[in-house]
Image (tube, coloured by chain):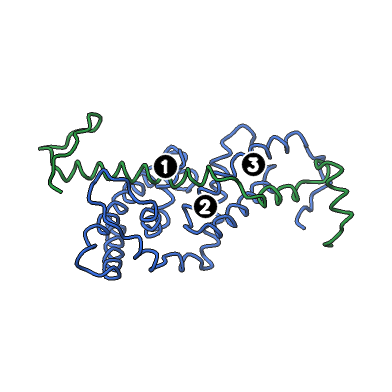
Amino acid sequence: MAQAHLNWGFMKKSPKGSPELDEARLRQQAIGARLRQLFDDVVNEPVPDDFLEILRRAEPEGSVSPAAVGKSTAEGDEA
Amino acid sequence: MTSASRSDKPADPARDAAFKRELVALIPHLRAFARTLTGDPTSADDLAQDAMMKAWDARASFEMGTNMKAWTFMILRNQFYSEKRRSWRQSQLDQEAAERTLVAIDDPSAPVALDELRMGLGMLPAEQREALILVGAGGFAYEEAAEICGCAVGTVKSRVSRARRALQAILERGDYDRDGASASEAMGSILAHAERLSNAR
């Protein structure tokens, strides 16, 4: 792959324009972008319902709406 | 149930509600941190849920107005290591999947395949992986990442740069070894190489 490659203005040019170093920088940028994408893809997923469900069940009774408390105690499925 | 202190102290519903709003907004980030840390969606969501509940249970000790994202990430991280101690990540490196995703990247500016990166992340030592994720994807400053990981800022910096180098080497070896060596031989040498890199200084 000894072709001429782009000289990105915002990157410091390596001494003697070493192709290896330029290439390493390009790869690092590509890896960085992909890593952020990997992370952001999950951030952008809808949150599964059970997260909110678990949190709702953990709320102290005082701060839960009376309807919700009435429902869960009326069903009384677990002790 | 664990809610023992229900009536000891008058609850502060307004504070709880504000805390909860902020915590709910962080769930996507906790999931992303867990996913990139473990590499496995199912155990990642378990981990994120555990962390979320630990944060909720500890809400009284959180100082509102401070960095809740860093605080919850620290909780998740601690949870990850305490669970990791009882096995778990062993099965993480799925050899077959790894072999399938060893694809060439001939053009250095070509986008890195996500699967390949996922595999590469999984090969990094955990403390390098977490440092790279926090700084490179989570949006944390080195200082914040150091607080989350409970180590010095300089340690985070060196972990991040070692992680970057190792990851690059891993991805490049996938390229170099593609023709010639068989995929599993390639995997073996990648692992050995990654290990050498991560042990180096």
Residue B91 in the image, given as x and y percentages of width and height: 46, 68
Closer to the camera: disc 1 or disc 2? 2
Task: Give the secondary structure at mark 3.
Answer: helix
Q: On the image, which quarter does residue B187 sit in? A: bottom left
The residue that label 2 is drawn on is B34
Q: Which subunit holds the residue at mark 3?
A: B
- Disc nearer the start of the sequence (3/2): 3
Residue B12 in the image, given as x and y percentages of width and height: 77, 37
**Letter of the chain in green:** A
- The foreground one among A69 and B196 is A69
Q: Residue extending furthest left?
A: A16
Residue B24 numbered mark, or none = 3
For the residues marked 1 and 2, what is the alpha-carbon distance in whole angstroms? 15 Å
Amino acid at dot 1: Val
- The foreground one among B132 and B99 is B99
Q: Which subunit holds the residue at mark 2?
A: B
Residue A52 in the image, given as x and y percentages of width and height: 68, 47
For the residues marked 3 and 1, what is the alpha-carbon distance in whole angstroms? 22 Å
Q: Are the residues flagged by discs 3 and 1 in contact, CB closer than 8 Å?
A: no
| Side (left or right) of B30 relative to B101 | right
For the residues marked 3 and 2, what is the alpha-carbon distance in whole angstroms? 16 Å
- The foreground one among A47 and B76 is A47
| Side (left or right) of B7 relative to A38 | right
Label 2: few (<14), some (14–19) or many (≥20) C-alpha neighbours in 10 Å: many
Residue under disc 3 on the same chain as residue under disc 1: yes
Q: Which subunit holds the residue at mark 1?
A: B
- Disc nearer the start of the sequence (1/2): 2
Looking at the image, is B153 positioned above or below residue B99? above
Q: Residue extending furthest top?
A: A9
Q: Colour of chain B?
A: blue
Residue B135 numbered mark, or none = 1
